[in-house]
Image (cartoon, rainbow, N blue to C red):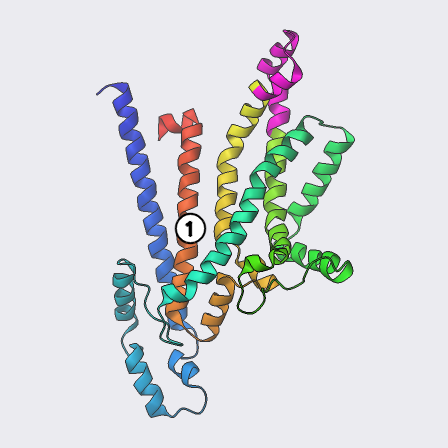
Amino acid sequence: MTAPRRRSARTARAVLGRLAAAAGTLLAASVLVFAATALAPGDAAAARLGGRAGPEQIAELRHGLGLDQPPWTRYGHWLWHALQGDLGTSYANGRPVAELIAGRAGNSLLLGAVAAALLVPLALGLGLWAGMRAGRAADRVVSGVTLTLVSLPEFVIGTLLVLLLAVGLGWLPAVSLPPAGQGVLSRPQILVLPVLTLLSVSLAQNVRLVRAGVIAAGDSDAARTARLGGVPEHRVVLRWILPAAVVPAVPVLARYLAYLLGGTLVAETLFGYPGLAAALVNATAARDAPVVQGVTLLVAGVTVTLNLFADLLAAALNPAARSTS
């Protein structure tokens, strides 16, 4: 077998291995979530009927929902239908789970997409700007701000933003709720605080990563040789510094995009945003296992898919990883 064919075979095996690992991760997540909902105290039938229902009514509803079956039977039934694209029906109201979470999933995706669209240019731009001014006042300011943001938890940053921009200055609403019967985009200012909260830690870490890459690339032999040869500084940046700094940062940025698109639950909960977090909280309170499993599977699926993309992108950009994969 020739060398290109061997490399292609290794690449195919690596992709298949990562796909199998992603499928295993989703399966494990579904098992853990189902077990957690099955072991949680309370009963979906009793929660749906309220405190005035008698034992006979609760038993009848439990039978109708299939809650009187063994847990492994219920899980197998749910998994079989989930593989066919059917996430089941809500225990609380009998509506299809996919219908219940579709609108909220769109809101969560919008929130994550706005943050992701801002993350990439800001991280690259600020990292390049600070790295080209290493040791100067501007670099010290950027480094100090990013270090502070990295050291604070997301919910603390969100709380501080509310106190400053909503309570103190009154510029933005403290709660991210759209008007009744209208979509999120009818009042776009409600996106600002959740997006800033999502961006805080991820932007700070990526700016520091790009900055370090720019400093290292600026001190490389290639950049120094180009400068000695009379190449203008802007061409040195575009030809040698920026590519060398960006390539190692791209896979990390891809992982943070996965976080922004699949991990908005903390920001949503903090600001009351009508996304998947609210659906998850309401379903958990109602012991609505199908909705909990549907939301969790969706979030896990987005996260696993984007992390798989980040792995493949890292292998494609790293010759050493590509040759050993």
221 within the magenta span: yes
Q: Which residue is at 51% across, 48% downward?
A: 113
Instruction: Pick whichever, 176 or 304, lies toward us.
Output: 176
Q: Which residue is at 37% across, 63% downward?
A: 98
Residue at the spot of label 1: 302
The location of residue 171, given as percent across then percent down, is 73, 57
Magenta-highlighted residues: 213-238
Q: Residue furthest left?
A: 1
Number of numbered discs on residues: 1
Q: Is residue 220 above or below residue 68?
A: above
Q: Is residue 121 above or below residue 291?
A: above
Instruction: Pick whichever, 76 or 162, lies toward us.
Output: 162
* Residue 35 in sight: no
Q: Is residue 35 left or right of residue 119?
A: left
Q: Is residue 179 left or right of residue 171?
A: left
Quadrant assignment, res 320: top left
Main secondary structure along the magenta-highlighted residues: helix
> The N terminus appears in which quarter of the rendering?
top left
71 within the magenta span: no
The location of residue 47, given as percent across then percent down, is 43, 81
Mark 1 surroundings within 10 Å by alpha-carbon count, few (fewer than 14), some (14 through 19), many (20 or more): some
Quadrant assignment, res 39: bottom left
* Residue 104 in sight: yes
The location of residue 195, given as percent across then percent down, is 60, 52
Q: Amino acid at mark 1?
A: Val
Secondary element at tag 1: helix
